Amino acid sequence: MGAFLLAVSAGCTPVPTARIPPGPEAAIPDALPQEVPERSETSKALSVYYQRLQNDLLSQGLMRGDGGGPDTPFTDVMLSRNFIRIALFDEYVTAGNDLRAEATLSRLRRWEQPIAMQIEFGDTVPLAQRERDRSSIATFSARLSRLTGVPIRQADRGANFHVLVLNEDDRPSYEARLRELVPGIADSSVRAFLYPPRDTLCLVIAFSEAGAPTYSKAVALIRGEHPDALRLTCIHEELAQGMGLANDSPQARPSIFNDDEEFGLLTSHDELLLRMLYDPRFEAGMSAAEAAPIARVIATELLGGES
């Protein structure tokens, strides 16, 4: 099994890592507690920081949730170009035991099996927040399923896509669980999950069996300290990127696959990218050169030849 992408937000970024062997199915965590432990001062300080960050972004008119409009027109040529840049490039590579930002050509990757999605919460995540997040994740995953045609169901066991909502206090004790979910996971990926810098808002890593160009597992991390709007932004971005749209592009607009944070929720442009990625005319493993002419045809069909 090999890791295909690591996508982080405040830029969502992909990175290949070492191949890892398949392992046994991970155990199901214990039932949720009726009370949660008090959070540390570090975690509380992060909540304040991210609330200020969200307020600042919203005050600038960023984190838009309108999907784009007359002020964000795009053509079939632009859509096709953005598709290649986002679906056929990796943004991060593995350098030893570390990750380095370096845009590199990749191959078309996507799910070709049903997704069973399991949501897990750290011990310190408030119970009311868990209910909101479960609802948000279930609603958005159903939308992704409609757009891609990939069956996605919420699961308590046998999952192949894990969404972890963890606070700062929860992550250090999650190493064993992470290695259980993905046996043989690279140390660089473990460190990315356990010790993300403050400006890494969330991330996702997708894995393949024996280097195949199709996904077999994915694990996403959402910081529990985020306020509601920022957390929903992370849910949209990481789950969508976990479907195979691994890279970002500064030219993509209106899009969440852009580091400028103008849009916080999946846009009309992004919906088309997902429909393109799962069009049967593409095959997993295609190179950018092979995919580009097909992308132009599909983009023209989707937008009626608007050039």
Image (cartoon, helix red, strand yellow):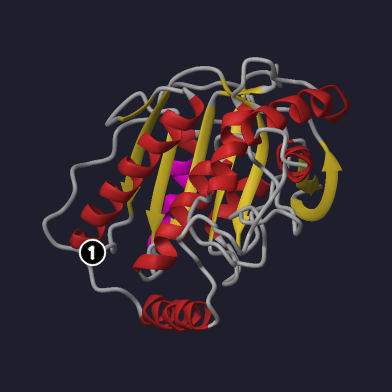
Quarter of the picture holding the N terminus: top right
Picture coordinates of residue 134, whole percent (x, y):
27, 48
What secondary structure is the stretch in magenta mostly built from? helix
Choose between 262 and 109: the one closer to the eye.
262
| Residue corresponding to mark 1 | 126
**Is 184 on the left-hand or right-hand side of 299?**
left
Whether residue 74 can be seen here:
yes
**Is 236 on the left-hand or right-hand side of 31?**
right
In which image quadrant can residue 105 be found? Answer: top right
- Residue pictured at 64% horizontal, 54% vertical: 12
- Residue pictured at 70% horizontal, 16% vertical: 283
Range shown magenta: 170-178
**Element type where label 1 sits in the image:** loop
Choose between 27 and 152: the one closer to the eye.
152
In the rendered structure, does residue 100 fall within the stretch colored magenta?
no
Choose between 271 and 205: the one closer to the eye.
271
**Is 173 on the left-hand or right-hand side of 23?**
left
Q: Where is 15 relative to 226, above or below?
A: above
Crowding near the residue tagged with mark 1, few <14, some 14–19, many ≥20 C-alpha atoms within 10 Å: some
In which image quadrant can residue 294 be found? Answer: top right
Whether residue 287 can be seen here:
no
Q: Where is 141 relative to 231, above or below?
A: above
Picture coordinates of residue 164, whole percent (x, y):
41, 49
Picture coordinates of residue 277, whole percent (x, y):
63, 29
Picture coordinates of residue 104, whole percent (x, y):
85, 43
- Residue pictured at 51% horizontal, 22% vertical: 23
Amino acid, disc 1: Pro
